[in-house]
Amino acid sequence: MKLIITLIIVLSTNLANAFSYTHSFTEAELQQQIEKVMPIVKQKYFLTMTLSNPQIDLIEGANEIGLKSNINVDAPGGMGGAGQAHIVGQLEYNQAEGAFYFKNARLVDLTLDGVSPELLPEIKKAAQSGLTRSLSKRPVYVLKDSDVKQKIAKSTLQSIMVKNQELEITFGIL
């Protein structure tokens, strides 16, 4: 009896795996996708912030994506500066659209040349809310209806994980 139960469990596990589809993205492939939505220009309060020249970093273990980018901040009166922003977040799947969005983003580092230290905390606060909101509204990747596997896979997301410096996305076919 134990043998039959074990056999049923093993077969059902293999059958479930047979009806899944895994798509892997390298950092370079994700880089190409994120470059399509750049530059991002966001106005928040009295600031205009521009993100450009993104660099993707897959963070294994945390299943997160890091985005390092040039940032340019302009403020009235000729104030502003240029530097680097480092934003970390996760991919979230929108089943209705078959699209992945950068969500739960947080600004982990911001350096700006030419900005007084007194203004930096306010700029960081504006950048955190404005830029992360902008990033969350633009899809990083949209499944292609022209690819039969991707079209079928739109129905069920099983997992998103960073593994071996690739982003692995597994869908259930049924």
Image (tube, rainbow, N blue to C red):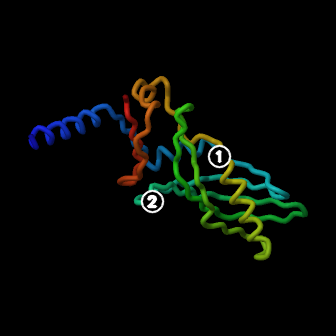
Q: Earlier in the sequence, mark 1 or mark 2?
A: 1
SS at circle 2 = loop
User: Which of 50/169 is in front?
Assistant: 169
Is 34 rendered above or below residue 173? below
Q: Amino acid at mark 1?
A: Met
Residue identified by numbered label 2: 62
* Cα gap from disc 1 to disc 2, whole angstroms: 25 Å
Q: Position of residue 174 (x, y in %)?
A: 37, 28
**Furthest residue in direction right, as rendered:** 77
Measuring from the top left, give residue 93's x and y in whole percent.
Answer: 52, 41
Q: Is residue 54 left or right of residue 148?
A: right
Q: Is residue 112 left or right of residue 146?
A: right
Rendered residue at 62%/53% (across/down)? 53
Check the picture and name the quadrant holding the N terminus.
top left
- The residue tagged 1 is 38
Image point (47%, 23%), residue name: 146
Q: Residue at x 25, y 33 (%)?
A: 15
What element does badge 1 sit on? loop
Q: How many marks?
A: 2
